[in-house]
Amino acid sequence: MHRSEHSSEIPIWFFVGVLLTMYGVLIGGYGVYAWMVGRVAPVALAYLHAPIWWGALLLVLGIFYCVKFAPGKSGKSGKPSKH
Amino acid sequence: MPMDFVATTLCALPATHVWLGSGLRGTGSTFPTPRALAIVLAAPGHSQLAHLTGLDVVMIAVYFAMVLYIGFYLKRLSNTSEEFFLAGREMTAWIAGLSFISANMGSLELMGWAGSAYQYGILATHWYWIGAIPAMLFLGLVMMPFYYVCKTHSVPGYLKLRFGESSRILAAFSFATEMILMSGVNMFSMAVVMKVVLGWDITFSILVSSLAVAVYVGLGGLRSAIYNEVLQFVLIWAGALLVPILGLVEAGGWHKMVAKIASNYQHQDYVHLWRDTAHFSANPMGVHWTGIVFGLGCVISFGYWTTDFLVVQRVLAARDLRAAQMAPIIGSFFKMAVPFIVILPGLLGLVVLHNSNGTLMHLVGENQVSAANPHSYNEVLPLLLVRYCGPGLLGLGITALMAGFMSGMAGNVSAFATVWTYDIYQPLIRKKAPDHHYVSVGRWATVLAVAASIGAAYLVMHAAGIMDYVQALFSFFIAPLFATILMGMFWKRATAAGGFWGLLIGMLSSVSLFVWVQLEPTALSIVALSPDAKSMAENLYRGLWSFLIAITVTVVVSLFTQPKSIEELHGLVYGATPLPFQEPVPFYRNQWFWAGIVSLIFIGLNILFW
């Protein structure tokens, strides 16, 4: 049973970034839409508009990971951390 | 399977709080067992807690698409056995560390411990702090060099090197059986949770989630499991973190929440970790600090975190020894933070949940659910999720619960495939075969594990009485295994016969104590040393006694049998193994520095919440 020399081309952190970005767009987009048309979901603390700022947070984190760990960037091939 | 059948069948049985052994993998004291949840479902007036919108369904679909894509993408990187079973030993400390934690953090654990926190208060945090942190540091700093230097592929594999084939086979069969049964129990429990929360059909939930796990683990092996576990870890936090944040806002902050708890429940202390543990009767768990410190902190948690291959496998995939040592330490930071998304919601439930008429909502035990009190402790997390999360956020929260389940199941399945291939198939069925043959065996073992888990899930559905016994398997095995490995690693005189008989008799003694208390409940006062002890204390002391018995038997038998020579112990035992030289690194990348930071935070938290 022998070892492999290669590593993955797309870092896991890029997948994380893509998922967070998509969720940020979906949640934040819905939050903005609901606020604009006045159809905020009847949940506790609805006036805080959690979907907007939580979605924005996910979006920012997602974009950060997508950019920092984009496939093909040097030194990021499956080894995003030097820890 | 019609849920009403399950409910009818299971309602005939007494509902008990089942503790799974370690507090560690789905091991909540008030773990939401299928039996318990079925009782909740059958209660008059109970209806599903939440309704998903189209947006929520899209959120869930995006998640499934992503995990399946990762499985297909990584298939081409899982061609050799080293790649398939150990992810090529290429994982960074961060990836291995997050995967290590994620495999442990099942959704049922989230719900079960939130329920425990509602019932017992902050005492439940012991299973995240003293019941995890010292053991994780010990694994990283002390035990990992041995696992890593001997290049074992599994924990049973280490037993083979140290104690011989018989110990390996005993451990491998026990572990493989445990993985399948636990996977099935968790699968069914998750399906029942989805039924309770969303009204989903049980078979639909089981098939969709288990097939997704089978595809991505079967294709990409451990690498795919690890990648998805990291993804699931992020999702769990993204989906669960909003609840305590909004809950604290509504409660007016931590201090106001504590004051309201004191006001609402004047005869119960919910916010002290240690203050009321001097007597069994002084705290709602019925535990004593000696049981927490010695049973949980010194035996059971060490047994789980250092010998359970489900979690150890993730660390073995690290790319070098320093990464392998850092992984559990990184994981320990997040483990210390988990109470924020698990225990805190339980406490918030005591304050912010109200009935429609404005009165405080009282959650009750599963067997007390009625039209007047339609919700049980275990529903506290979903209730808060529904309270704060509208479309989109609710989908994210539900996805987090599913991600937690799938990460746990993928852990079971990938660990089973490795132990089956290396520790059962290779030594007993086909010793010499080409590498690709073992990869194929591993892929088929993954499919077999998922199929067997589905079978186990339906077995549980039809014979719910076995639930308690299946879940108790952990506690039967973990403490004696820890004793055996501890003696093997740190006592050169320990012999093969000593290791085998210590492990076997330790396991049998644990089973005996369990059966004794089941048959004669008054025996609890003897096992747990107090007539005031409750079932939680029994588990802690049972682990402690079986550990001590395993140690004693190992020592006695070893002294009467022939030990291995020092040369044969090279790479396996402390004192006979020169640890590999590690290049000096700056202090901020040194594992001892970060372990020190973790220790300080751990001590500080215990003092803060004393």
Image (tube, coloured by chain):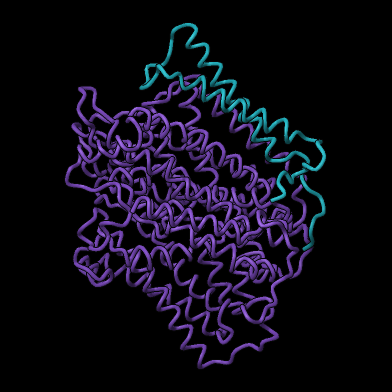
**Letter of the chain shown cyan in the rendering:** A
Q: Name the spot of residue B351 as percent of width and height, x first.
A: 28, 34
Nearest to the observer: residue B347 or residue B77: B347
Q: Nearer the viewer, residue B264 or B67?
A: B264
Q: Is residue B264 visible?
A: yes
Residue at position x 25%, y 38% in the image: B259
Q: Is residue B311 above or below residue B401?
A: below
Is residue B30 toward the left or the right of residue B447 in the image? left
Instruction: Measuring from the top left, give residue B273's x and y in whole percent.
Output: 33, 53
Picture colour for chain B: purple
Percent from the top left, x then y, of residue B30?
33, 49
**Residue B491 location, quadrant:** bottom right
Q: State whether residue B205 is above or below residue B602.
A: above
Question: Residue B392, relative to residue B131: is it above or below?
Answer: above
| Picture layout, residue B262 above or below residue B535 | above
Total number of numbered labels?
Answer: 0
Is residue B154 rendered to the left or right of residue B524? right
Q: Quick one: which residue is furthest to the front in this view?
A: B587
Quadrant location of residue B48?
Answer: top left
Identify the residue at horizontal 31%, vertical 63% (top origin). B289
Q: Is residue B463 something that shows in the picture?
A: no
For the N terminus of chain B, give its image quadrant. top left
Q: Nearer the viewer, residue B70 or B99?
A: B99
